[in-house]
Image: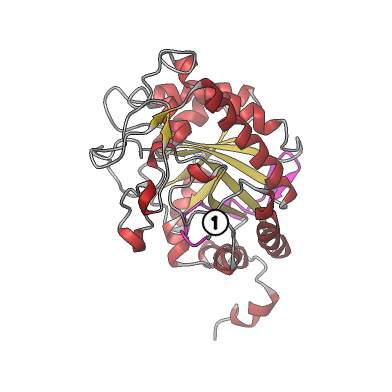
Amino acid sequence: MSLLFSPITFRSVTLKNRIVLSPMCQYSAVDGFANDWHLVHLGSRAVGGAALIVTEAAAVTPEGRITPDDLGIWKDEHIEGLKKITGFIDAQGAVAGIQLAHAGHKASVSSEWKGNGKFLLPENGGWQIVAPSSVPFDFEAPIPLELKIKDIEKVTDDFRMAAKRAFKAGFKVLEIHAAHGYLLHEFLSPLSNYRKDKYGGSFENRIRLLVEVVEAVQSEWPGEYPLFVRISATDWCVGGWDIEESVRLAAILKEKGVDLIDVSSGGLIPHAIIPVGYGYQLSFAVRIKKETGIRVGTVGMITDAIQAETILQSNDADLIFIGREMLRNPYFALEAAEKLGDDIDWPVQYRRAKKRC
């Protein structure tokens, strides 16, 4: 059997293979509620053979949404719709995961098909955005409100309560989103964090909020279930967050009991030059894994079964997060197994199609 289709265990949770549906915003919720679109989108990838199905970024507070159409988990009423989805995913032999997020100064924008991602002012359906410092995302963005200490404490509690709801909704893997220029990443990077208090300045101060969020989430998230953290390994900009700091952070998160670092990059600086290409972020995952020993997931332009298998055979990563390719092909995992010569179970409803004439 290939490594791509070998099982892997995190705490009490065993994934049947190493393929993960990477979190991807669908911009299809109303007031944060999951609906039939989310059920079919996530459920079809579970039917398609992926082992871990991770929701799009679920906002821990209304003002933490990227758009008014984001998935949410900031109130108990959200649990019922999410529970329907996790139940279906479980029934397919996959594991349901959720990504908890706060968009920070990248919040309050329109969905791509409703306004090309333009920032929304309160009079146009938007809201007051917040950040570690009053630094806008770009020259067209509004200036965010700098969070006070009491506001930061509320953010931490919002993540804690979201984790509690996630457990009630039936999720078995939880990922904290600290990447792509959203709030927790904004605290990490000196390009967006100009604070002079205990949350700004030194490396130890800039990582403080993320560490506190991890600890708050762990106070509600069951110890037998794994906790992942997604980071941007570099801002791709001089003077920004970089791979050296990412390695230091990963070592600390490992000590705190985080089970895996989901290694992405960028998102903070709109004009950053990013060399996007075939597996372009893999080197960051390799370095974090090698220097800290923590398990890592790699993501970014992974489009082929052989590519994914080679990454695993080289011991460069432990999980393969696949995004756009799984949007194009919900059955990527079933097709990858055939390409690698692995005989895996298909859904009983589809087995007649497994044998080709």
| Vertical position of residue 151 compared to residue 327: above or below | above
Q: Is residue 292 visible?
A: no
Q: Is residue 352 left or right of residue 108?
A: right
Residue at 38 percent of width and 41 percent of height: 106
Q: Is residue 45 left or right of residue 122?
A: right
Residue under the point 48% across and 18% down: 199
User: Is residue 158 found left or right of 288 in the rendered image?
Assistant: right
Residue 109: x %, y % from top left: 37, 50
Q: Write the start and end of the magenta stretch as one range.
A: 2-29
Q: Is residue 106 or residue 62 the one in the foreground?
A: 62
Q: Residue at x 51, y 51 (%)?
A: 23
Q: Is residue 65 left or right of residue 271?
A: right
Q: Position of residue 192 (x, y in %)?
A: 35, 27
Considering every residue shown, the one lying at the far bottom of the view is 357
Location of the C terminus (image quadrant): bottom right
- Look at the image and name its color scheme: secondary structure
Q: Of 284 and 82, which appears nearest the observer?
A: 82
In the image, is residue 7 part of the stretch drawn in magenta? yes
**At 44% from the left edge and 32% from the top edge, which residue is drawn?**
185
SS category of the residue bearing label 1: loop
Where is residue 227? Give x, y as percent.
64, 37
The front one of 16 and 195 is 195
Amino acid type, residue under disc 1 in the picture: Asp
Q: Nearer the viewer, residue 301 or 234?
A: 234
311 part of magenta stretch: no
User: What x and y, as percent, mark residue 25?
Assistant: 46, 55
Badge 1: residue crowd in 10 Å (few <14, some 14–19, many ≥20): some
What secondary structure predominates along the stretch shown in magenta? Answer: loop
Residue designated by label 1: 31
